[in-house]
Image (cartoon, rainbow, N blue to C red):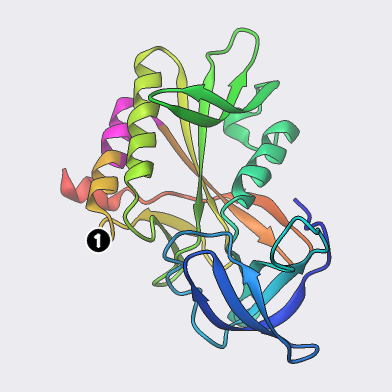
Amino acid sequence: MRFQTELVPARLIRRYNRFLTDAELESTGEVVRAHCPNPGSMMGLKAPGLRIWLEPNDDPKKKLRYGWRLVELPDGHWSGIDTAVPNRVVGEALRAGAIAELNAYSGIRPEVKYGANSRIDFLCTGDGLPDAYVEVKNVHLRREDDWAEFPDSVTARGAKHLSELSAMVDEGHRAVMVYLVQRTDCARLKIAADLDPTYAAAFDAARDAGVEMICYGTRIDRGSVEIASALPIDTARQAAAS
């Protein structure tokens, strides 16, 4: 997934009201207001002074001239903050056959209604194959070592999705949760049970019900976010709790 226009560097002043950000452009020193396409906690990615990258736009229908896309991390690493990006990246990867667990499917339909007033991110179909209901989650929390963690705050919606995926398994379909790690300094994923124990319990229940849990990393630079290799998901917490 390539950004539509060239990103420009800025220094974060503050992120507030969930969807708004003030930043100082490095090129001119101008303070601009940018759209923050992320309603989550953004733990560790919103400290004032961070070097961030904004996407300019000249669309007269948009109130803000910039959208926040990336955080520049130490040692040449990056994190994406746009929660709409993972669906675009995974959609491209599914169509290209780049997700090994799902590369046998030729039909890829986004935003299909299912469950209790929900829409599945992707419904994958193929001759002689069970339908695969695929949900995508954005991951960009890192607190220790090279662990990515999900979620970064309480997500009742996320737990609901896991329950609905379990119901699809009960109906004889495949159900797949794809965690896309939108930062380049992580090599594995674990569930942040301390931040949302309800989600952690829902994860365990869904996995036991047959929901497939997979995780992929990303390659990120100033021009694009692309899917990278598969990453392992930790099961030590679940084993210790059982």
27 shown above or below 16: below
From which residue to which does the magenta span run? Answer: 203-211
Q: Amino acid at mark 1?
A: Asp
Residue bearing the label numbered 1? 194
Whole-percent x and y of residue 229?
A: 62, 50
Magenta span: predominant SS is helix
Q: Is residue 119 left or right of residue 201?
A: right
Whole-percent x and y of residue 48?
A: 52, 86
- Residue lying at 28% horizontally and 39% vertically, measured from the top left: 202
Q: Is residue 239 left or right of residue 75?
A: left
Label 1, residues with CA under 10 Å away: few <14, some 14-19, many ≥20:
few
Which quadrant of the view contains residue 75? bottom right
Whole-percent x and y of residue 175?
A: 45, 26
Q: Is residue 202 left or right of residue 127?
A: left
Q: Is residue 206 magenta?
A: yes
146 shown above or below 170: below
Q: Is residue 133 left or right of residue 51?
A: left
Single out the residue that lies furthest toward the bottom: 29
The quadrant of the rendering that contains the C terminus is top left
